[in-house]
Amino acid sequence: MIVDELFDLVSYRVDREPHIKVNQVICLQCTHKACTFICPAKCYLWNAEKNRIEFAYELCLECGTCLLACDRDALEWNYPKGGFGVCFRLT
Amino acid sequence: MKAYDVIVVGAGPAGSSAALRLAQKGLKVAIIERGNTPGSKNMFGGMLPRCPIVENLIPNFWEEAPWERHVIKNIITFMTDLSSTSIMFETKNFDKPPYNGYTVFRPIFDKWFADKACSSGANLFTGCLVENLLRDGNAISGVKIAKEDGEIHADIVIACDGVLSLLAKKVGLCKETKLSDMALGLKALFYLPEEDINQRFNLVRRQGLVHTILGCTEGIRGGGFIYTQTESLSVGLVLHLDALKESRVAPYDIFYRFLSTDRLKRILKGANLIEYSAHLIPEGGYKSIPKLFTDGLLLAGDAAGLCYTNGINQEGMNLAITSGFLAAETVYEAFEKGDFSAKQLSKYEDRLRESFVLKDIKTFEKSVDLMNNDRLFSIYPEIVGSVFEKLLQNNGKPRKKIGHLSWNIIKDSMSIKELIIDLIKVGRFIV
């Protein structure tokens, strides 16, 4: 088993619009970039070449960890529209 | 023009309990759920502790509800890299109906529970996200859902919208959530045939087990868990968010290393991973409970921060169901009086204070301090392991008595000051 197998087993209904918006200007100033390691779905990656956060909202588990870990107000955080987003089958 | 007497936001255990009770009392109730089905956004260890209120709401609850196994066995393990020390308790008293606790799957249980509310007359709307609350002056007078003409008016709203409690923040009932008041739960669900589970954990029929593990979180405050369902195992970690952020380690990496330990590998041999999930858990205890009511609005369940752990009991679902029920009782009384003011609704808090819900959270107020002790998750499992190893080791050297031996290990592991601080905390916790 490899760690990425965990993420492959989650079901989603992906909306076209991201439900969380990242303010890249603020992220650029952020020294800890906690979102890039604390998100349990690995949605946030720091792209050093482009100097920006790459954010994959499609994989979000809607837990809210990033919202609490971000202490700079860089996230405009909402749940996905009704019926969209993660869909746990059994858990 | 109001469409409903009461709108309940969220078809989790708190929401469906409230809606069921209100519908039973003859009020016109709508439940609004953002998932496509109730429970599809929920993650859970987990065990529903026996909950007498739900037995009042649904007679023969334990016969009818779609639970997986009834828990008869609890194990607490202190784990280190090399050793593990466990305490196991099981009793025949927990093997008799209505049983002491049940493992459940939330998408199945929550749907069943919401259907119960619907068969009593509540209306369930799924796939609808409540974007905002409607106001009439200072009072909450309904909800706005993210659809055209999405304004729905009601006399009272019960917000059971879960741990982040975005609606409570919108009305100013709770301020910023502190990182230190939250834990992140991660869980992997593994399929394993029923007979293998029974054999591996020494269970028969639908007997179940709850296993709590300390010392498996790489020094981060938190713990591990294993719950048995009929044909699956829920294996996971709970990590305190402040400690996790400080560690700069990815939670799934810690989780993966936990799953890769020899002990877990043996338990999971031949098991197939079927689902992964993560969710926040309110762990701030009594001090972090927000104001629970305002004009025209009540909070219940995780949205009200009604959840606690004292290291032995982990409760949430039973508190959610009970708080939903007590919210419904308060709302019904408000309808009888025709008064939906905060003053009238404050009786909800009185009811919660009289019930085990706030009493238990208050009783274990100090256990939050104990759980916030880093040593509990690193040094103590090592001490317990070392004491037992020295007691049992055969090396031709003279043995020492347990007290002397333990003292030597403790004083090598920590300062006397730390020990005294911890003893005081433990003292507050146990008496």
Image (cartoon, coloured by chain):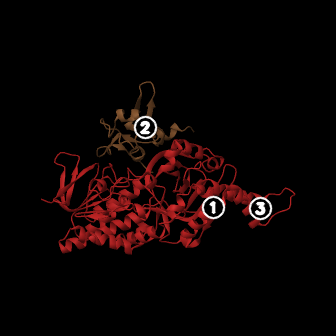
Q: Residue B429: horizontal and vertical position, in percent? A: 54, 68
Question: Marks 3/2: CA distance?
Answer: 48 Å
Residue furthest to the right in view is: B396
Q: Residue A62 or B403: which is nearer the viewer?
A: B403
Which residue sits at x=38%, y=37%?
A: A58
Residue furthest to the front in view is: B417
Number of other residues with Cα within 10 Å of mark 2, as a class: few under 14, some 14 to 19, many 20 or more: many
Could you tell me the amino acid type at mark 1? Lys
Q: Is residue B6 visible?
A: yes
Query: Looking at the picture, does residue B199 appear above or below residue A6?
Result: below
Number of other residues with Cα within 10 Å of mark 3, as a class: few under 14, some 14 to 19, many 20 or more: some
Question: Marks 3/1: CA distance?
Answer: 26 Å
- Residue labelled with disc 3: B391
- Residue labelled with disc 1: B417
Query: Looking at the picture, does residue B249 appear above or below residue B92?
Result: above
Q: Residue B242: horizontal and vertical position, in percent? A: 48, 50
Same chain for mark 3 and mark 1? The answer is yes
Q: Residue B266: horizontal and vertical position, in percent? A: 64, 49
Q: Nearer the viewer, mark 3 or mark 1?
A: 1
Q: Nearer the viewer, mark 2 or mark 1?
A: 1
Q: Is residue B315 visible?
A: no
Which residue sits at x=34%, y=62%?
A: B300
State which quarter of the image contains the C terminus of chain B.
bottom right
Could you tell me the amino acid type at mark 2? Cys
Instruction: Chain letter for mark 1, please.
Output: B
Which residue sits at x=46%, y=47%?
A: B277
Chain letter of the red region = B
Instruction: Chain letter for mark 2, please.
Output: A
Q: Which disc, if any, is residue B31?
A: none
Q: Residue B255 or A48: which is nearer the viewer?
A: A48
Q: Colour of chain A?
A: brown
